[in-house]
Amino acid sequence: MIIGTAGHIDHGKSSLVRALTGTDPDRLKEEKARGITIELGFAYWPQPDGRVIGFVDVPGHERFVPTMLAGAHGIDVVLLVVAADDGVMPQTREHLAIVRLLGRERAVVALTKVDLVDPARVAAVTEEITALLAPTAMAQAPVIPVSVVTGEGMITLAETLAGQTDAIHATAKRFRLAVDRSFSIAGAGTVVTGTILSGQVAVGDRVVISPSGREARVRGLHRQNQAAVQGVAGDRCALNLAGVGRDEVTRGEMVLDPLLHAPTQRLDVRMTLLADERKPLGTWTPIRLHHAAAEVLGRAVPLGPPIQPGASGLVQLVLERPVAAAAGDLIVLRDISDSRTIGGGAILDLRAPERHRRAPARLALLEALDGPVAPALLRRLGACSPYVIDLVGLARDRAMFDLAPLLDAGNLRLIEPGLAMDTTRWAELCRDVGAVLDAFHQSSPDLQGVAFPTLRSNISPLLPVPVLRRVLGAMDDVIVQGAWVRRAGHVARLAPADEAIWQALAPGLGAAVRFRPPRVRDFATTMGMDEKRLRAVLKAIARRGEVEEVAQDHFFLRATVAEMALIAAELGEAGAEFSAAQFRDRLGEGELNAGRKVAIQVLEFFDRHGITLRRGDARRVDRRRLALFVPDRIVA
């Protein structure tokens, strides 16, 4: 359990921690000289039952609220400190607002310095504190008058704090630790400290520092200030990391399970604007985001009308640099000058879109995402566009493990590893796709299949192109062949005489001459047939999807076009540019070489389909378009 102090400057927070634990949390020379807390302080309080309670002592000065926020995210119980001589002060109210925004509901109030005032003042300040907490979840928090000078109330305070039940933490999730300090120890190397937000970590584990992406190994570990081999969610831990330098890890970064490394600069959140704000939150409002120990500048864009003081709403945050967050994390927003707290809320989605952020389908998806990952949430997502759930992404963005156990209760069907769809909608989609294909094959038996865009526009719901391709690929009786879709059992049939012509033609397009096949007129001459008849047959075969007319009257087998597309992809590996001559040289050697003219015709064909992008005499490959001719080579 971690207890965190909160309250106005000079109300005795550090003195209380020192009196309870015997450890002075003010460790800096400047803190001792000035008598105020500037940085986060830490102390540990062993209990008779073997537990070790950790304390996070935060600064009370308004200038150090960002530092206070860095420590407040990891606490379980708030020790709200109010001096009897001052009473409730500005930072008392702001610290209370912050811990409320961070969802902290358990509190103990220490009414300090009672040795300096009379009983009437103690009663008055107690009443003031009660009124302050009345509208909050901390309304029943005990208020304990104490004095570190005389010892009054200290035993009661110690017993009350020690009697707090341990918090329930997300130990079944993947590991995340929010870094609030980084330093080096002679002979050990880099050490980072922070609170484990979820999961567990052990000596020897491989981890990633996010958002920087640096990899490290846990060489050693201290848990609640004691050497250990493992730390779990809720613990304050010090990790000795191998593979990174002290200056390569800073406050605000996360040490996490490598599978969770997916930083983002756009967050969709549900936030509440504090009631004492003077004006609504409008579009592109400058903000300062505080998430765990991170502090990042950005802009806020309400996804509806401006959010009024005291109200809540959906907001997109556009940040100046990436953060390592998880959906469900709580955040605090302050004004751009960092002089006041304006609101806070919960992260709903880490993959917020730049465009169409206010589209009805997008807003419906955010409403569906609002809540813990459970069968009910999966059912809501299954009813929202794009109607297909990325289980891998959903689990990663929530620091979770496998979601497969929730599929049955969520009424979901796994259509491929990591991709699920509502079972009812899946059945409807299969029925609709089958109806479109059957009708088309009946009316056009000589054609290979339905054009992909035509099929997409004739089924409901209108799925995104990548999603529909993956869904169709999971249907047993449907074949996606480049830009065509057909029933698995459908074969485009020509008239018997035309089919015989194609069987005679086909060998002349393959094997050694596949990169320089004869043209229609050449076939007509060698076969002694009418050129127009041959051209009509080849065009019918092209509609069937077995050949491509790369240039006028120059037909290539579709398998050969796929082979040439992969050759272009190899030449354009990692974004490299290549010339027509380089491409020509790869298309056979000696008499079998296609020649410059044919190579250029092929590249111009690829240009028209977007597979290659021409700039002067050079070309590069758009690997995402390879799926037009090589379905199993969809490259992001």
Image (tube, grey):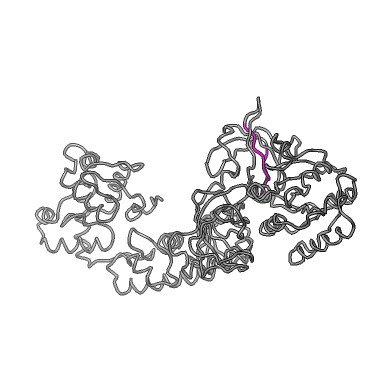
Check residue 197 for magenta coloring.
Answer: yes
Q: Is residue 226 above or below residue 424?
A: above
Q: Please state which of residues 365 and 514 is positioned toward the viewer in this rendering.
A: 365
What secondary structure predominates along the stretch shown in magenta? strand
Q: Is residue 453 above or below residue 248?
A: below
Q: Please state which of residues 15 and 406 is positioned toward the viewer in this rendering.
A: 15
Total numbered badges shown on the rendered structure: 0
Residue 217 x/y as whole percent: 60, 35
The reply, left or right, for residue 18 in relation to residue 591 is right
Residue 559 x/y as whole percent: 29, 51
Identify the magenta region.
Answer: 190-202
Q: Quadrant of residue 465?
A: bottom left
The reply, left or right, for residue 595 in relation to residue 188 is left
Check residue 600 for magenta coloring.
Answer: no
The reply, left or right, for residue 223 in relation to residue 206 is right
Q: Quadrant of residue 584?
A: top left
Q: Residue at x 39, y 63 (%)?
A: 488
Residue 129 x/y as whole percent: 79, 61
The reply, left or right, for residue 600 in relation to residue 470 is left
Q: Residue at x 84, y 58 (%)?
A: 142
Residue 85 x/y as whole percent: 81, 54
